[in-house]
Image (tube, helix red, strand yellow):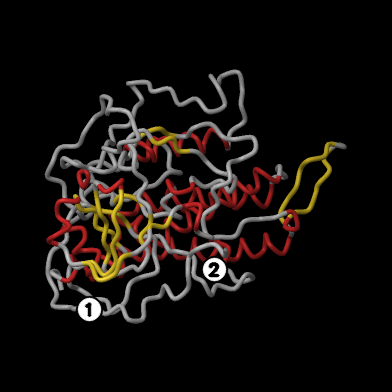
């Protein structure tokens, strides 16, 4: 089974012929977010386009492996179902206007949509409470407590405070991020990780999740065993030694129906500049989101001030999985030469170590408190030969022509 993880069922050449990418368990090849100095913006839909871990595969994060288990929107989800709320974007018909002291411009969601959200969020909060009460989940107690409180607060604001339609859309996007984080963490903890270490039987088909890019062979094997979509990035010199069954076309953000790459109007400022492998991007996203969700006062330098104060800069840095020479995420021909940055030391595990998962909406202090907590590395093996004849990707992800 582990040998099968390195046989490319699908593959294509990337990075102007300097690299190639393969995947055994997913029939589409997504364009990796290459570049050391990527400028990451919030788009029209209040997500971060192909830099958003809830929508597009990212480099594997050894600290936060559950992000690869973020659910991908099903093709057959009903538009009026509770599940569809995870990917729903409001249009003008979803609002009711409210006049406050003869001032126009405030709105709330339609009562029936608010009720649908409330029922869905209450269900998620109940799952969180059940998860926390389980002693085996002690490692994630702080993370879930903070995330569930944040989720509850966002829902209360959505119900209680008249806002601009733009701000309602922003609040809905935040609710969706938090619930997707929950879903991924629960699934990784209860199903995926037990598969990887041999406590549960191996998979027979690939999960319909976001997945991850990796250059680490152990990550490829673990995710293949766990049933998570994973794309192996190879140096071009390795091509003669790798079997590839089918040549696939690269899929770019503007081609797929689930990603909105329209810039906001007016456009947002840059939330973070750097490599997709830099964990400081989560801190940058968190700071940007908090600044957008705050009222500007005379205490603020600017609406979105991201100046780097050495005393407050996060200690989280680049991911070990991409620190070896030839890292395509750090060595793109289209970006300037690397500047000074802090690097992690070699030797970290390709599965959770040093900390519990987190993501962009958590505060700086919460992100820092993750260090010092640890969990075990993956172990065990399986003699499974995966079968992907009934792959869940039965429909094209491409936008209609």
Judged left or right of residue 261, residue 26 is: left
Judged left or right of residue 284, residue 401 is: right
At a point 18% along the width and 67% down the height, the residue shown is 243
| On-image quarter of the C terminus | bottom right
The mark found on residue 388 in the picture is: none
The mark found on residue 83 in the picture is: 2
At a point 76% along the width and 43% down the height, the residue shown is 106
Disc 2, disc 1: CB below 8 Å?
no
Q: Residue furthest right?
A: 102
Q: Position of residue 10 (x, y in %)?
A: 29, 66
Compared to residue 294, the image places residue 16 above or below, namely: below
| On-image quarter of the N terminus | bottom left
Judge the density around disc 2: few (<14), some (14-19), many (≥20) Cα neighbours within 10 Å: some
At a point 35% along the width and 68% down the height, the residue shown is 27
Judge the density around disc 1: few (<14), some (14-19), many (≥20) Cα neighbours within 10 Å: some
Residue at image mark 1: 201
Depth check, front residue: 119 or 201: 201
Q: Earlier in the sequence, mark 2 or mark 1?
A: 2
Q: CA distance from mark 2 to mark 1?
A: 27 Å
At a point 55% along the width and 72% down the height, the residue shown is 77
Q: Secondary structure at mark 1?
A: loop
The answer to whether one can see residue 198 in this image is yes
Depth check, front residue: 100 or 292: 292
Question: Quarter-wise, where is residue 37 in the image?
Answer: top left
Judged left or right of residue 257, residue 51 is: left
Depth check, front residue: 112 or 249: 249
Question: Quarter-wise, where is residue 180 in the image?
Answer: bottom left
The answer to whether one can see residue 185 in this image is no
Judged left or right of residue 233, residue 268 is: right
């Amino acid at each position: 089974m582990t040998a099968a993880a390195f046989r490319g069922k699908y593959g294509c050449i990337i990075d102007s012929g300097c690299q190639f990418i393969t995947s055994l368990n997913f029939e589409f090849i997504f364009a990796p977010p290459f570049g050391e100095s990527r400028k990451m913006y919030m788009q029209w839909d209040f997500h971060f386009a192909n830099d958003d871990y809830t929508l597009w595969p990212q480099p594997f994060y050894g600290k936060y492996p559950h992000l690869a288990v973020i659910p991908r929107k099903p093709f057959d989800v009903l538009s009026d179902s509770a599940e569809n709320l995870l990917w729903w974007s409001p249009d003008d018909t979803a609002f009711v206007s409210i006049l406050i002291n003869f001032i126009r411009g405030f709105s709330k969601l339609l009562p029936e949509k608010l009720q649908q959200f409330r029922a869905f969020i209450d269900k998620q909060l109940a799952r969180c409470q059940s998860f926390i009460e389980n002693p085996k989940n002690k490692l994630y107690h702080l993370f879930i407590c903070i995330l569930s409180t944040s989720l509850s607060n966002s829902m209360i604001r959505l119900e209680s405070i008249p806002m601009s339609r733009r701000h309602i859309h922003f609040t809905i996007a935040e609710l969706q991020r938090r619930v997707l984080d929950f879903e991924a963490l629960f699934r990784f903890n209860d199903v995926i990780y037990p598969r990887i270490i041999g406590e549960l039987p191996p998979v027979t088909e690939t999960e319909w999740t976001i997945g991850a890019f990796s250059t680490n062979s152990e990550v490829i094997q673990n995710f293949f065993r766990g049933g998570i979509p994973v794309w192996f990035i190879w140096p071009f010199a390795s091509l003669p030694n790798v079997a590839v069954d089918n040549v696939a076309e690269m899929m770019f953000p503007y081609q797929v129906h689930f990603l909105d790459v329209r810039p906001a109007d007016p456009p947002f400022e840059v939330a973070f500049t750097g490599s997709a492998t830099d964990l400081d991007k989560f801190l940058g996203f968190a700071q940007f989101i908090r600044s957008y969700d705050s009222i500007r006062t005379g205490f603020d330098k600017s609406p979105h001030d991201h100046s780097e104060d050495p005393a407050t800069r996060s200690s989280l840095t680049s991911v070990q999985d991409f620190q070896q020479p030839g890292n395509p995420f750090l060595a793109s021909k289209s970006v300037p030469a690397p500047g000074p940055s802090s690097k992690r030391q070699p030797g970290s595990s390709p599965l959770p170590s040093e900390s519990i998962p987190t993501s962009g909406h958590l505060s700086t202090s919460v992100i820092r408190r993750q260090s010092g907590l640890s969990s075990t590395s993956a172990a065990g093996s399986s003699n499974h030969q995966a079968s992907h004849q009934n792959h869940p990707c039965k429909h094209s992800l491409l936008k209609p022509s």
